[in-house]
Image (cartoon, grey):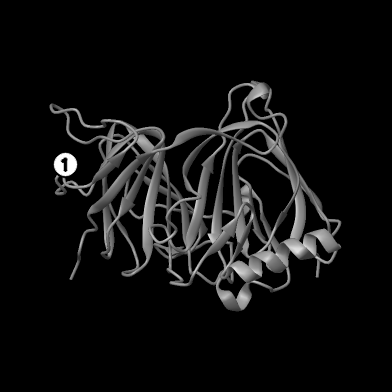
Amino acid sequence: MNETRKIKMVIKSKPTLEGAGVHLRRAFGFGKTSTFDPFLLLDDFRGDSPDMYEKGFPWHPHRGIETITYVLAGTVEHSDSLGNKGVIGPGDIQWMTAGSGIMHQEMPFSNPEGRMYGFQLWANLPRVLKMSAPRYQDITSSQVPVASPQPGVELRVICGDVAGVHGPAKNVAIQPEYIDLSLAPGVEYFHPTVRGHTAFAYVFEGEAEFSCETDPYSYEVEGSNYFDTERGPWLGNHSLVVFDDGNRVQIKAGDKGVRMLFISGKPLGEPVAWYGPIVMNTEEELRTTFRDLQNGTFIK
């Protein structure tokens, strides 16, 4: 039996500064982790001029998490303490499993129009993998398959299995689905989800209505008054939509279509001890990490 997920909350991503002075918008992060478990943070770093992002993210540590960087325009050059170097461009993804620890930097560069567009998602690692060996999955745009389960629906499947299409990101403990989802104007689509998994959408082009039977005044709204009494609860750019449980999500595109990230994953249900780019299970593990940084024993 189909059960359409209702909306739990809507959040407007908030301007913030990160790295050495990068202007971005944070959809969620550094707050209540239970709401988004197993995910920790989602940053929207779309910028239309180099002064918004050119200072980048110089050398910094990560332990206990995975960082997923998805570029839409411009490029990101990355390098790390293990000697890895590379560049990801439009449509490319870097899925980095920090595991026991890695030092890295990410430096963004514009396209000819001065734009640098992308997103970074942080996913938690379960306790048993916190101290696993670091690894990368570098995925080029050409490796990302596209599913079209019905006319007017296009799904770039980065991770997960959708409509018989399998995403290239593999062997991720939280069983995530990461999709760049586009609907043509006016199209209605029911996207299947795994019951019990956390699921959310982040709209970045056009607008959509979600879970159309949901009373728009029955759920939490953070950031602004979204609702037009004549048009209903249409959600556009910078809107994060978090869903209750169920086995599908209803999406109806507006008159200009819509494009969004759709992300879901299996909650870990584990304690979280978090300081900056280090995410462990206990405060003692955090203290151990910072002793490792001070003593030069962080890289295992």
Where residue 196 sits, quadrant-wise, is: bottom left
Q: Quadrant of the C terminus?
A: bottom right
Name above or below for residue 131 compared with residue 30. below
Q: Amino acid at mark 1?
A: Tyr
In the foreground, 49 or 104: 104
Q: Position of residue 126 (x, y in %)?
A: 55, 73
Q: Using residue 98 as the reference point, say whether residue 206 is left or right of it.
A: left
The residue singled out by tag 1 in the image is 217
Name above or below for residue 176 compared with residue 188. below
Q: Using residue 241 as the reference point, say whether residue 49 is left or right of it.
A: right
Q: How many marks?
A: 1
Q: Quadrant of the N terminus?
A: bottom left
Q: Position of residue 51 (x, y in %)?
A: 67, 22
Q: Position of residue 112 (x, y in %)?
A: 68, 22
Name above or below for residue 258 compared with residue 86. above
Q: Position of residue 184 (x, y in %)?
A: 34, 37
Identify the residue at horizontal 36%, vertical 37% (top origin).
258
Identify the residue at horizontal 33%, vertical 51% (top origin).
242
Determine crowd level at label 1: few under 14, some 14-19, many 20+ residues with C-alpha closer than 10 A: few
Q: Using residue 257 as the reference point, say whether residue 280 is left or right of it.
A: right
In the foreground, 31 or 178: 31
Identify the residue at horizontal 43%, vertical 65% (top origin).
164
